[in-house]
Amino acid sequence: MKVNVLYCLCLLVISGCLNAQSSFENYFTNSTMRVDLILAGNTHSQAAYLKEIKKEPIWGGSNVNMIDTLGYGEYFYEIRDAASDQLIYSRGFCTLFEEWRTTEEAKYINKAFEQTITFPYPQQKINLKLSERHKDGSYSSLMELTIDPEDSNIRNVKTPEYEVVEIINNGSSASHVDFTFVAEGYLSSEMDKFKSDVEEMAAYILTQEPYKSNRDKINFWAVCSPSSGTGTSNPRKDNWQNTAVGSSFNTFYIDRYLETGSVFAIRDIAACAPYDHICVLVNSKKYGGGGIYNHFSIGTSDHPMAKEVMLHEIGHGFGGLGDEYYTSDVAYQDFFDLNVEPWQPNLTTMVNFDKKWKHLIDKDTPVPTPVESKYQETTGVFEGGGYMAKGVYRPAINCRMKTNEAKGFCEVCQASIVTMIEFLSD
Ligand SMILES: [Zn+2]
C-alpha cells in the first residue's frame, strides 16, 4: 500500500508541475499586464477605481508558481480565464494606503493613493477580482473587471531609456528572484555612485542568512533613473527635492519613515528590468526607510546603518514579515485584532499558533517564553511585537525585524524568507 501511495504522490507532484508550466504557456505571454488603480477612503471605508491598463515589455516573475499559496497581505487579487472561469494567477499585497487608514487623521479626512497590480500578459479575456481583507480575517470584493488583452486602449508602454545594469546575474528571471533597485535622488552625474551603492547593498544582503545560502537563486539589477534634485525631501527641514519617485521623510509625521505615494513612477522605472521585488535606493545619509509587502522597499544609501535598514525593509516588502518591535514611535493605532491570528508569518496572537512556528519550539521551552538570557538564542514565543506590548508575540528575543543591532533574522523569519525565495524561483 505504501508503494501505491508514494506512486500516486509522485504522479500528483509531476502532474502538478506540468499543469503549472502549461498554465503559463496556455494562458500568458512573456510581457506584463499592469493595472493602475486609485485606492481611496478613510478609516471606515475604502473603494478602488481603475485608472489605466498598460502593457509592459518584460515579465520578470515566475513562470511556474502562478497561484499564491502563502496568503499574505491586506489585499488579494485573482485572475480567472473568462471563458472557463479557471483561476490562473493570484497574489496578495499591502499598501501605504492601508497603513494610513490606521492613523488618527484617517478618522476625519478622505485620501487617495496610487496602487498598481501586475501579472503576466494574458492571451485571452480575463476576469480580475481585487479583494480587501477585514480585521476579522474575512475578505470582500473591492473591484471586479473583465479585461480583453486585445482592447485597443490598453497603453502599450515604451519603457524609459535608462541604463539597466546587471549587478549580479545568476540566470533566467523566470527561475530566479530578481531584486531590482531604482535610483532615487541621484543626479545623472552620480550614476557611478548609484551602481556602486547597489553593488555594496547586494554584496551585504548576500552575506546575510537566508540569502547567503540561497545566493545562486537571486539576481540583482540596477535601473539608473536620474533625478533633477538630490537626496530626498525632508519636510521637517523644509527641504523639498524634485526626485525620480518623489520620496520623503516624515511620512505620517514620523521623521524616520521614508516613503512615497508615487507608485506609478516607481513601476514606470522598474519596468526597464525584470523584477520580483522593487527596492528604491535613496541617495541620502539620513536614517530611515520603509517596506510594504509586494509593494516596494525603500531605504537610504549612506547612513552607517543603511544596509541593516534595507535588509529589514526587504523583510517586510519581499518576505511579508511583520515588525517584531513594539516600543518605537509609530503612527498606527490598534494594528492587530487580538482575536484574530495575523497573517504575518513571524507574529502570533496565539489564536492559531499551530499554523505558525509551533513546530520549531523545543518541548523544554516555556510558552510564552520569558525574556531571560538563557533564551537569547532560542526560538520561543516572546510577548511584544507588531507595535503592541501585550497580546502579540514574536519568535525571538531579538531579530533583524526588531532591531538593527540584532545579529540577523531569527529562525522563523529565515524560514519564511526561504519559502518566498523557493516560491518565486521555481
Ligand atoms: Zn524574526
Image: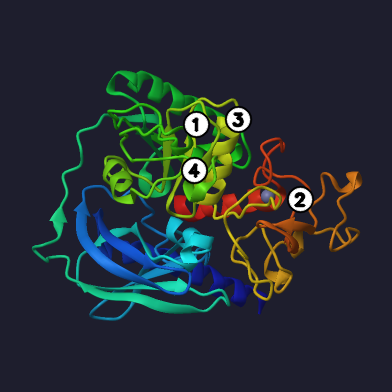
Q: Position of residue 149 (x, y in %)?
A: 17, 65
Circle 2: element type: loop
Residue mark closest to the camera, 1 vs 3: 3
| Label located before the other in sequence (2 or 3) | 3
Question: Which residue is disc 1 drawn over?
Answer: 202
Report, in whole angstroms, how far the alpha carbon at label 4 lies from the one at label 2. 30 Å
Q: Which residue is mark 2?
A: 396
- Rendering coords of residue 191 (x, y %): 33, 22
For badge 3, the amino acid type reads Met
**Viewer-nearest of labels 4 and 2?**
4
Assess disc 4: are there few (<14), some (14-19) or many (≥20) residues with their C-alpha within 10 Å of its C-alpha: some
**Direction from residue 99 to residue 327 in the image, left or right:** right
CB of mark 4 near ligand 1 (< 8 Å): no
Measured Cα–Cα span from mark 3 to mark 4: 18 Å
Residue on which the image places disc 3:
305
Q: Secondary structure at mark 1?
A: helix
Q: Crowding near pointer 3: few (<14 within 10 Å), some, many (20+)?
A: some
State the separation of the CA atoms marked 1 and 4: 27 Å
**Pair 1/4: label in front:** 4
Q: Residue at x 40, y 48 (%)?
A: 276
Ligand 1 within 8 Å, label 3 CB? no
The amino acid beneath tag 1 is Ala
- The answer to whether residue 143 is seen in the rendering is yes
**Amino acid under disc 4:** Asn
